[in-house]
Amino acid sequence: MTKTKNKSKIKVRAVSKEAELRKLEARYCSWGDTVHYVSKPNIMVRSKGSYLYDIDGVEYLDLQMLYSGANFGYGNDRIDRALKRQVDRLPQLACQYMHEEKIRLAAMLGERMERVFKEKGRVHFNVGGSQALEDSLKLVRNHTHRNLVFAFMGGYHGRTLGASAITSSFRYREKYGHFGDRAHFVPFPYCFRCFYGMKRNTCNMYCLKQFEKLFETEYYSFFNHKTRQCEFSAFYMEAVQGTGGYVIPPAGYFEGLKKILDTYGILLFLWMTRYRWVFTGLASSGR
């Protein structure tokens, strides 16, 4: 009887705490467009491995894993130890200073890129995907002195203003007025649901031909053949489209697209972040 009473008291306290938290959240917390997909989101209090635990102690298998950002598992001992060592020694620095870890990680990534892509470059670290994309837009503008870009229908690049401008879904821009630098959206080569109603075995890359057709004459508004200048600076894309449906383009498509872009002086910006570690599930297999 005593154990039953104790469990009842604990349950009452948990319910009371949850009610208080929901009341505070409703009054003070900003409601982003990802938080309240359900009317009553669970309130989690701890995590371990692949599991989350709510305020009542109920265990949930987390198939989302922080939008695939925690694929090594919550409370991973190896990662926790490394984080604690770094926090105790040197947690953060202003950008005016350097530290060994940043330099060595940049070198490791840069050397890897040189081996794989045979290109030399520098590594710029940022706090998230949208912010990284915003900085890339600055780089593109600085290099080309042009601000308009191409992007794919179905592409998702983030929710900051610049990223929303090149994300095809109108709902991400709907509340924020006119986007003067909105991307020109091109149909993604989704062969199963072809935008042009074609069949892959007979289309002969019809979508590529339609894209190339935009540059045939100045009257299509993209390219001036007299000055050899294009109004568009870059083409932003995901190698494998994620939010748009986990779509893999047909073999040979990117080679053909790259040839067109090179002909008209347009940069190809391959948005690797969402492709490499989110949509391929880096470390999801435990390796």
Image (tube, grey):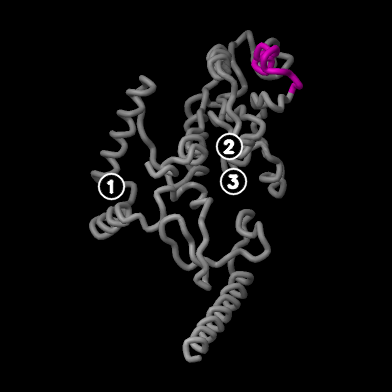
Furthest residue in direction top, as rendered? 226
Q: Amino acid at mark 1?
A: Tyr
Q: Is residue 205 magenta?
A: yes
* 274 or 77: nearer the viewer: 77
Q: Residue at x 53, y 26 (%)?
A: 145
Q: Percent x, y for residue 192?
A: 68, 26
The span shown in magenta is 196-209
Q: How many marks?
A: 3
Q: Residue at x 37, y 21 (%)?
A: 119
Q: Percent x, y for residue 78?
A: 29, 52
39 over 179 or under it: above or below: below
* 139 or 207: nearer the viewer: 207
Q: Residue at x 60, y 23 (%)?
A: 232
- Earlier sequence position, callout 2 versus callout 1: 1
Q: Percent x, y for residue 286?
A: 39, 44
Could you say whether the residue bearing mark 1 is in a helix, strand or loop? loop
Furthest residue in direction bottom, as rendered? 2
Q: Is residue 209 left or right of residue 286?
A: right
Could you say whether the residue bearing mark 3 is in a helix, strand or loop? loop
Q: Which residue is mark 2?
A: 242
User: On residue 97, which mark appears?
Assistant: 1
Q: Which residue is mark 3?
A: 159
* 176 or 78: nearer the viewer: 78
Q: Residue 266, can we see it? A: yes
Q: Is residue 78 magenta?
A: no
Q: How far apart are the alpha carbons under marks 1 and 3?
A: 30 Å
Q: How far apart are the alpha carbons under marks 2 and 1?
A: 37 Å
Q: Residue 265, can we see it? A: no
Badge 2 crowding class, 10 Å Cα cut-off, few under 14, some 14 to 19, many 20 or more, is: some
